[in-house]
Amino acid sequence: MKKIQMVDLKGQYEKIKAEVDKGIQEVIDNTAFINGPAVNRFRENLEKYLNVKHVIPCANGTDALQVAMMALGLKPGDEVITANFTFIATAEVIALLGFTPVLVDVDPHTFNIDIKAIERAITPKTKAIVPVHLFGQSADMEAVMELAQKHNLFVIEDNCQAIGADYIFKNGSRKKTGTIGHVGCTSFFPSKNLGCYGDGGAIFTNDDELANQLRVVVNHGMVVRYYHDYVGVNSRLDSIQAVVLDAKLKHLDEYAAARRYVADYYDKAFANCDKLKTPFRAVNSTHVFHQYTLVTSNIDRKALQDYLASKDIPAMIYYPVPLHMQKAYVDPRYKEGDFPVTEKLCETVLSLPMHTELDDEQLKHITENVLAFINK
Ligand SMILES: Cc1ncc(COP(=O)(O)O)c(C=O)c1O
């Protein structure tokens, strides 16, 4: 049996090696390392794939979020609402820019931002909502957009974990996650569903004016060469990463299907296990399974993780600590117990290996061992 990994980037690379190697060599040969034709090609292909007017490539997903907030013209002291159960980057950029992160709890089924909790958190200082499409499934975007419209707020989608997922509107129409709010952000970190071989990110919008401002902010606030009208940042996707992403973009739907195959296998294996809750699949979103995350109950999660490790099966906890209990984010507004769903999830979730290269032999080994621990 092949070694089981949380993510198998080598196996995936072997299948696209010829195209990736040729593309990388071309970049080296033509030396257009920054802003070369490869970046433009990928940008256009991603715009087509997402059916969005503008993609602005940048250096990583954290920058994408930061640049989006800078370009929207938010001011220090403005309140930005986001989900408590997420990777730190979402709240980090809000804090870094001097805005006030307002944390809200999540839905116990989807793990995505709780709409009622958003509504309760809105104040006259609120300027934006950042829904996170966690683990590969869309937040309830129709409800988020309705609230945003009602209160005149910007919506910045953190789509770092869900590229390729479809949000399904009540009328049956679909849009790619990240293209529904005013602006969407993604990460091309290697382990992401569309990952490069280094760091990368992108920002999406259908708003022409905002797109121009995003392009200015990622490029040192420069409107005319060497004339800086704004304080910006330097955030670029390099050509070598663009070549890798362009090769992988052609396979993104196939990759999602491979991930869903793994999720279906796990779902079936654990269907009758009352100590494991398999991922909920919302009717208003397709799921691209960035992670396959179980909620455990009445078992010692650490002991399960250790048992799996002894069988060469990695398993990870995304995420072990709610944002309001992170040392850097301790805030007198919040105390332990304020976010019961997030706090419970942090104590009980466990993510199993999830990637495009898992085979039945590995899946059998993983599921049999999870059940062996639980039934012993
Ligand atoms: C939800 C979420 N937001 C933001 C980020 C930040 O992306 P990056 O690591 O590319 O900066 C990530 C990924 O790491 C993420 O999972």
Image: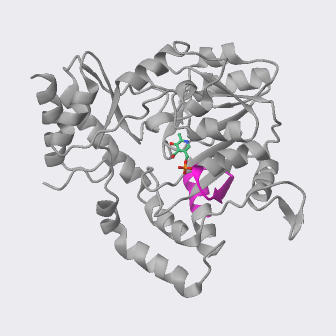
Q: Is residue 375 visible?
A: yes
Q: How is the image coloured?
A: one colour
Q: Which residue is rendered at x = 64% and y = 43% of the image?
A: 184
Q: Residue 250 at what x, y percent from top left?
A: 45, 61
Q: Going 69% across and 17% down the picture, which residue do you hit? A: 121
Quarter placement of the N terminus: bottom left
Q: Is residue 98 magenta?
A: no
Residue depicted at x 70% and y 41%: 96
* Vertical order, 275 against 35 (above or below): above
- Residues 142 and 72: in front is 72
Query: The magenta stretch spans which residues?
Result: 44-61
Relative placement, left or right, of 348 versus 309 is: right
Could you tell me how many numbered marks the image carries?
A: 0
Q: Position of residue 350 (x, y in %)?
A: 33, 31
* In this rendering, position of residue 15 left or right of residue 32: left
Q: Is residue 271 left or right of residue 255?
A: left
